Amino acid sequence: QVQLVESGGGLVQPGGSLRLSCAASGSTFSSKNVGWYRQAPGKQRELVATIAIGGSTNYADSVRGRFTISRDNAENTVYLQMNNLKPADTAVYYCNARVPYGSTWRVLFSWGQGTQVTVSS
């Protein structure tokens, strides 16, 4: 059974930075497309960044230029570097592998516990 463990969240002031980590036990991330998602209170979970098996990346418009997704295949870990954080970035952040599903994508594993990011002065 695959277990996803997100870490690195915390309380940060606007303009600050955090680096989130996502580790997967029981599976190899290097052979998967992976995404970082977030869910703010009262809102649906949204996709913020993806990294493909080959390393290409994509970002939601709201985070492009501020967030960077990367992967370390040797450590079986995917990272999300978040710079110039804004209060609107406050959410629980999750990662998951993604697979094509018809004309869209679906997540591959059960969700982990996520990591809370709070941006506030």
Image: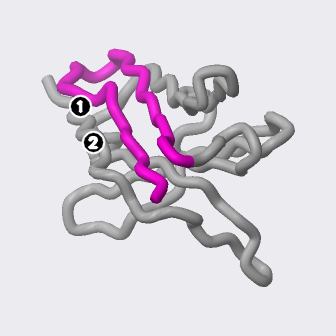
Residue with the mark numbered 2: 90
Location of the C terminus (image quadrant): top left
Measured from the top left, where is residue 55 in percent x and y? 80, 34
Residue at the far right in the pictured view? 54
Estimate the spatial distance between the alpha carbons at disc 2 and disc 1, rounded to whole Å: 5 Å
Residue with the mark numbered 1: 119
Residue for point 76% across, 45% down: 31
Measured from the top left, where is residue 38 in percent x and y? 39, 52
The kind of residue tagged 2 is Thr
Q: Secondary structure at mark 2?
A: loop
Measured from the top left, where is residue 79 in percent x and y? 53, 28
| In this picture, residue 85 sits left or right of residue 57 | left
Which portion, as a residue range, is magenta? 1-26
Residue 112 among magenta residues: no
Residue 17 among magenta residues: yes
Assess disc 2: are there few (<14), some (14-19) or many (≥20) residues with their C-alpha within 10 Å of its C-alpha. many
Residue for point 65% across, 46% down: 50
The kind of residue tagged 1 is Val
- Is residue 59 visible in the rendered image? The answer is no
Question: Compared to 82, does 109 lie above or below?
Answer: below
